[in-house]
Image (tube, rainbow, N blue to C red):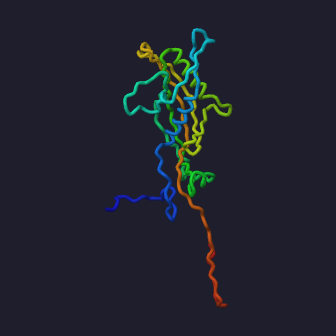
Amino acid sequence: MSAPFELVGTIFGATYPLPIPPPPETDDARRHALEGLRSYMATLRFYRRGPTKAQSNEFTVPEENILLEMPDAEKDLKFPAIAVIPGEGEHDSMGLGPPQLIEETADKFAPGTALLRLGEYIETITLEAWGSYRAERRALMVGLAQALRVLEQSYSLRLRLLNYYGCVAEFTLMKSRYVEDVDAALNRRRGWLMVGLRVPEVRLVNYTTLKPFVAVEVSDDPNFVVEVEQAP
């Protein structure tokens, strides 16, 4: 049975003869960016004020306490913890033209392949910081805000994603808010940091180089004439 549609155009990476296609992607640019951010946050050291300001207590947030998505099964949240609240994502294409082949990536990740830049993914995420006490929540809010603004060259935090073809993701602190609700009396205190996320969207595709050739027709007939048609 024939399909009731016909694809108009050429599929990315279509070359002839057809080679083995690159393996399909299992995670999108957003997931790679958030995994990079989680690994970065797990390296941070936070300082909770003790009885005096000079007696601060150091702590960290392990990766298993940094949630990028809602767990598949019910899970007890151990404090201190950080959760990512998603926003609406925008896929910003590269102008009106077709996607761009990044020439310097030719054969870099696999022979006969190169990266195709499809556009840029943009989203405002919310980092929800959870602590048991006011001092712990404050330490998380202060530490995360500082960690997002550590570079001399940029107001944004820029992370190279080694598991996503070395693309660079940017995280920009935009707003923050201390949340006070009924959970505070149960030693469940939280705060929000709104962060702008930008990351390139790329795809590994096959490519082939153009191999021009010239066909020459020869004859020993002295009356042999080759007609050349001149373009107007």
Image position, residue 165 (x, y; %): 57, 45
231 or 152, nearer to the observer: 152
18 or 63, nearer to the observer: 63
Image position, residue 163 (x, y; %): 55, 42
Extreme-left residue of the structure:
1
Q: Residue at x 46, y 35 (%)?
A: 88
Task: Give the total number of marks visible in the rendering.
Answer: 0
Placement of the N terminus among the 4 image quadrants: bottom left
151 or 231, nearer to the observer: 151
Q: Residue at x 50, y 36 (%)?
A: 123
| Corner quadrant of residue 71 | top left
Extreme-right residue of the structure:
152
Question: Does 141 sit above or below residue 63?
Answer: above
Extreme-top residue of the structure:
51
Image position, residue 128 (x, y; %): 48, 25
89 or 28, nearer to the observer: 28
Question: Does 203 sit above or below residue 148?
Answer: below
Tell me, yes or no, if residue 232 can be seen here: no
Q: Residue at x 60, y 9 (%)?
A: 52
Placement of the C terminus among the 4 image quadrants: bottom right
Image position, residue 75 (x, y; %): 39, 27
Question: Does 91 sit above or below residue 214?
Answer: above
Tell me, yes or no, if residue 12 can be seen here: yes
Q: Residue at x 68, y 31 (%)?
A: 152
Question: Does 104 sit above or below residue 231?
Answer: above
Indicate left or right for 202 with 76 as reference: right
